[in-house]
Image (cartoon, helix red, strand yellow):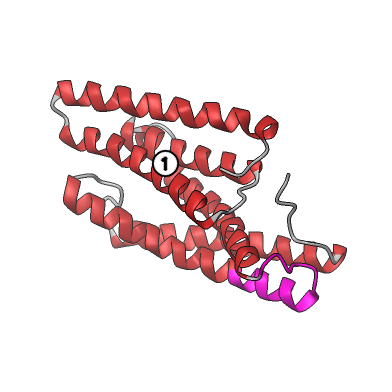
Amino acid sequence: MQMGKRKDKWNDLFELAMYVTAAVCIVYFLVKGNQAKMLQAVLIVAVLLIIRIVVKVTKTTMFAALRFSVLLFIFVTMFMANEFGFYKVIPYLDKIEHLFSGLILCFVGLLIYMKASNGEKKAVPSAQVAVWFCLFFSIAMAGVWEIYEFTTDGLFGLHSQNGSLVDTMTDIICGTIGAVLTSIYLAFKAKRRKMPLIDVQS
């Protein structure tokens, strides 16, 4: 990944620890005969690898704070919640995750917009378009995530959606709230400072 080595070494260690943990889970649940949990660990590895491949192929600079947020989100949602069953331990953990996902996806949308516009971030119209793009991208991805959960629940016998339309729609609403709040923050930041919305080197 194209990121500063010093700022990102802790992210490298964090990601490595996740690979090791996933490998341990694969072996452990294989021995226990829990195929669903084993496949969940395989999915975690797949998601981490896909992110790396996408970043490398698109030659995208992922700033350290965003990478940490993405890794933390994967750890909480896929390891703690699904693999280790923390949904039963922490009340409303799922809703907190989806609120947080709205924030992360807004910044992912911002990176995509910056990439598509060749780094032209200072013009006011571009900043306005960027904020709208971040908002709509984040909301759309909230729906895509629910499609992912629906698919893995059906294929691997997981229970991410609890078999409930109410749970699915509440998740999308929470993601949308997180996206709206982040977009408002970005809009005020762009209007007040008249600067690039983020510094990709931070």
Amino acid under label 1? Leu
Question: In the drawing, does residue 157 fall left or right of residue 94?
Answer: left
Instruction: Give the magenta part as a residue range.
Output: 118-133
The one nearer the camera, 134 or 4, is: 4
Q: Is residue 79 above or below residue 144?
A: above
The one nearer the camera, 11 or 134, is: 11
The residue carrying pointer 1 sits among few (fewer than 14), some (14 to 19) or many (20 or more) residues within 10 Å by Cα, namely: some
Percent x, y for residue 112?
58, 63
Percent x, y for residue 147?
32, 61
Residue sitting at the far right: 193
What secondary structure prevails in the magenta region? Answer: helix
Give yes or no for residue 121 being in the magenta stretch.
Answer: yes
Visible in this render: residue 91?
no
Q: Which quarter of the figure has residue 48?
A: top left
Question: Which residue is identified by label 1?
Answer: 48
Query: Residue drawn at (65%, 42%), measured in percent from left and top?
Result: 65
Work out which quarter of the rendered image holds the C terminus and state it.
top right
Q: Callout 1: helix, strand or loop?
A: helix
Question: In the drawing, does residue 199 fall left or right of residue 143?
Answer: right
Work out which quarter of the rendered image holds the N terminus and state it.
top right
Q: Which quarter of the figure has residue 185?
A: bottom right
Please state the total of marks drawn on the protein image: 1
Percent x, y for residue 166?
34, 61
Percent x, y for residue 81?
38, 37
Give yes or no for residue 186 being in the magenta stretch.
Answer: no
Visible in this render: residue 65?
yes
Question: In the drawing, does residue 157 fall left or right of residue 114?
Answer: left
The one nearer the camera, 29 or 180, is: 29
Residue sitting at the far left: 33
